[in-house]
Amino acid sequence: MSRLSILLAIALFVSPITAQSELIEYQIDQQTYEGYYVSPSPSAPLVMLFHDWDGLTDYEIKRAEMLAKEGFAVFAADLFGKGVRPTEVKDKRQHTGELYEDRQKMQQLMLGAIAVAAKSGGQTSNAVAMGYCFGGAAVLELARSGADFKGFATFHGGLKTPEGQSYAEAKGQILVMHGTADSAITMTEFADLAVELEQNNVPHEMITYGGAPHAFTVFGAERYRADADRKSWQRFLDFLNDALR
């Protein structure tokens, strides 16, 4: 589906949106954010998509459209703010660091985006959350918060559990797809998460892809690994079909 050029400004209290594909402006705590919603049908199951540390870019929009072709509605949320799409590493670290240090705000932004998705026609009662890199860490934050989703999936995302948090209230199943060659998020962190999920009786599956570094799904990047991308994407589609159909 084509990306519409007209922006629709909305707040959390507006009526449902019926367009199949659009950029959506919304307000959370007096700040403007801009997400992307695409849906093949009003009854389509929903995927909440959370971006990496670049902010919401064409990459996430491409992934959203790929999912729409598979029959899923997608709301790609914005966790940085409208127009905040950092390109320098120091700026990316600043924006992600602010949310890592303020977990309450991170949760508020995700819950606000979910409310916008619902107003847009998304079936939030039949939904899975997924994310890439920073967005993967955000998805696990959402899971720990007790969000009532059918599942949570992360691609090469942050795996550490912050001090004072746990998976005791987690609902739904968790899918972790990780590169064994990821030097930013180690296999020790991967193993620690596996133990923690098991201790909390959280249904989960955790997969590593040999030779895959951090950000192995990013098209055109030096670290892109086509084989790991293909396998992880297919596993994610199977996960969605199991959880949402």
Image: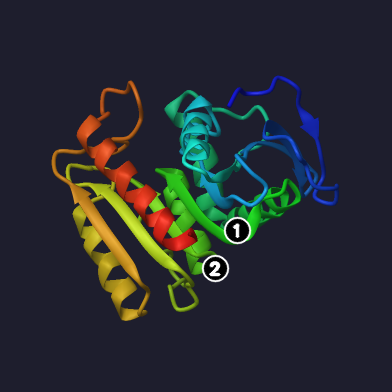
The x and y percentages for residue 69 are 49, 36
Residue at point 27%, 29% (across, down): 224
Is there CB contact under 8 Å for labels 2 and 1? yes
Q: CA distance from mark 2 to mark 1?
A: 8 Å
Q: Is residue 218 above or below residue 42?
A: above
Q: Nearer the viewer, residue 91 or 59?
A: 59
Res. 213 image quadrant: top left
Is residue 187 at all visible to an observer of this figure?
Answer: yes
The x and y percentages for residue 105 are 63, 55
Residue at point 20%, 54% (across, down): 187
Q: Amino acid at mark 1?
A: Gln
Q: How is the image coloured?
A: rainbow
Q: Is residue 195 above or below residue 75?
A: below
Is residue 160 at all visible to an observer of this figure?
Answer: no
Question: Left or right: 239 with respect to 120?
Answer: left
The x and y percentages for residue 60 are 50, 33
| Marker disc for residue 145 | 2
Category of crowding for the residue at label 1, using alpha-carbon neighbours closer than 10 angstroms: few (below 14), some (14–19), many (at least 20): some
Number of callouts: 2
Q: Nearer the viewer, residue 209 or 69?
A: 69
Please, which residue is most extreme toward the right here? 14
| Marker disc for residue 51 | none
Residue at point 46%, 38% (across, down): 52
Q: Which residue is mark 1?
A: 107
Category of crowding for the residue at label 2, using alpha-carbon neighbours closer than 10 angstroms: few (below 14), some (14–19), many (at least 20): some
Question: Left or right: 19 with respect to 180?
Answer: right
| Of pointers 2 and 1, the one earlier in the residue sequence | 1
SS state under label 2: loop
Residue at point 37%, 56% (across, down): 239
The x and y percentages for residue 147 are 57, 67
